Image: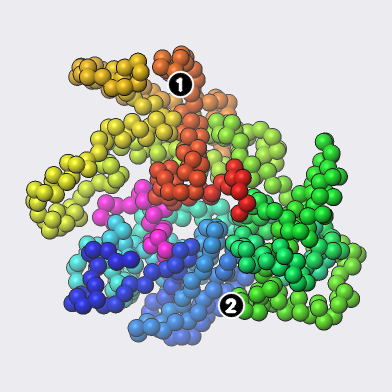
Amino acid sequence: METENEPRPGDLAFDGFRMRLPEDCVEYMLFVVGDKSLTKLEAVRKAAIEKAESLTKNYIWQREGFKLETKIQNGLSYLHGITNYGDNVEDEWLIVYLLRELSRSFPQLWVRVCDSDGEFLLIEAAKALPSWLSPENDSNRVWIHDGKLHIIPLQTAAGGHGSKSLSLREALTVITSGPDSLSHSTSIEAEAFYRLEKYPGQIADSIHHSLVTIPRKLAYIIHARPKAIALATEAFYLRDPISLRPLLSGSGPLLFPPTDLVTVSTRFTRVLYAQLKSQRFEPPPVWSSILQEGEAEVTPGDEEAAKKLSRLELGMKVTTGFEILAKNGHESNNRVAREVALLVEDLEEDGDCALPSDAEIRTWEEVGCEDDDSWMDIDFRDFEQELDGGRGTGAKASAGAGFGDAGTQADLQKIVSRFEAFLNDESAGIDGAELDEMDEDNDDESGNDESSEDEDKDVSLDEEQFARMMREMLGLPSGDGHQDRGKRTADGGPTSRPIDDDEEHDEDEEIRKLMAQMESELNGLGALSLDQSSSKLPAVQAKGSISKHVEEEEDGLVGGEVDIDYNLAKNLLESFKSQAGMAGPAGNLLNLMGMPLPRDEGDSDEDT
């Protein structure tokens, strides 16, 4: 979509349409500066593929894996790749980790990576960026070299036009002529690479094993092509009535009929497992009787029978996904999908003699492996203990995962601290952005149109009212409780009684003192420290939660305890949940901070 400032066809400045990445895609380019030979590029490509295969041997990519190809375009030779990571953003960060580690091995290698949002590494580091760097001029300025993040500053831009965006060729010219002129900030780098701290351990931690009850024929297919589970899960997740027609109508033979069922361990990623587990799906007619028999065996307190039923339901979803996938496997552009279709054809020719026996299945590497899936459950009551460094309650506490995990705690505290910093920043405007000298050109061009001033008055927003509403939504003290009571009558309507300026001043002073005291207590317990080490956690646990007594005369609550950080996180998540998957203030603010939340479809009664 074109913007008003972009040149259009027919304009002198128009040089073609600007290519944009599709959604959920990450693009990466690798340049060997100082050596234009294709031999060097091929050496880098082979090293990259070998490193990716060694790190992701048992990993399952959501849609596409890491890939590189040599590209020669507009006189430039480089390695190029685009990966569609779908719903699993961890695939994108795994690629960034691979590229960063690869850059350490080749001194002449410079890497550029971006996605459909643009320079997403700068979005991660938005809090630490200098004021001159903005989405209007950040294109092609961010590079990874020798494991570090480098930024091309304004003064080195070609032609001295530093406020404008750089082309790829201009950026490479700067790197080639003076690589030392690029700036390297440890604070920006720490924020941009914050998610990489959990790698390479995150690769193994993202895998989830689960027992599923499926046809023996499908068990053979999954054992031969374990990474096909991602394609089958997506086929099930994105199913439509046409793809389900063979299962629902029973008009033709099925590739994987629910006969000769076996229970085997299947490897998922956590995202894939959650997509299957959380989907509500009415069983096809061929599975209905089998599931009804399983439900009949479940009695109150019989956990083993409940587990068998859960494995059968999950196996029904997996089988449905593979049924859809294998039907159109020959026409797919994906190599794994075509391989699945060929394996199904081979089984039809060879018959049941090619299927594994029960004894063979017991020899498989991951037989009987089943991981705890309590990480899918969220108990809002545990947030207070989590923010205080506690382990929470239940299975998560004993397993040492989920609540009480240092990484999860750091993420939650980072969300809390960023919102508090935003709300307490008096210098920021409504957009949260500061005005600087970069906006002077735009001001000069806009002129002093009186009509635009009148329009601004019509759509103006009261910043104090906006801040008060945000604090109320996030569970923070609004700071104007007495003022609100002075403005409203008993029936909730506004009154015409003015508020004395001295009273407002006294209330403001009281609020500042109260906020300063609260911040002092939080800092004393380390709850606002983003780089909190594990040695500080016991101290936080010992001191317990920080509570603040507030009087809410309107609601009839006097002296109740309200945990500030807990209420902030709880109300933030509830606000996001109330959006019902649509755009809203909580989701937009979290996305701007680079912390998107997954959709919660657990409360929906409709079949998807």
Task: Name which of mark 2 and mark 1 comes first in the sequence.
Answer: 2
Whole-percent x, y for residue 134 in the image:
29, 56
Image mark for residue 252:
none
Tell which of 342 and 48 is nearer to you. 342
Above or below, 205 against 251 in this view is above
Tell me the residue at 35%/39% (across/down).
Answer: 422
Tell which of 210 and 305 is nearer to you. 305
Tell me the residue at 22%/64% (across/down).
Answer: 5
Along the horizontal axis of the image, is 166 left or right of 351? left
Q: Element type at marker 2?
A: loop
Can residue 155 be seen in the rendering of this structure?
no
Q: Which stretch is magenta?
A: 112-133
Per the image, is 123 magenta? yes
Q: CA distance from mark 2 to mark 1?
A: 59 Å
The amino acid sitting under disc 1 is: Lys
Determine which quarter of the picture holds residue 458: top left
Tell which of 106 and 467 is nearer to you. 467
Along the horizontal axis of the image, is 64 left or right of 284? left
Q: Quadrant of the N terminus?
A: bottom left
Determine which quarter of the picture holds residue 553: top left
Contact (Cβ within 8 Å) of mark 2 with mark 1: no
Q: Quadrant of the C terminus?
A: bottom right
The amino acid sitting under disc 2 is: Asn
Q: Can you identify the residue that label 2 sits on?
A: 333
Mark 2 vs mark 1: give the one in front.
2
Q: Can you identify the residue that label 1 sits on?
A: 548
Characterize the local packing of mark 2: few (<14), some (14-19) or many (20 or more) Cα atoms within 10 angstroms: few
Above or below, 483 against 586 in this view is above
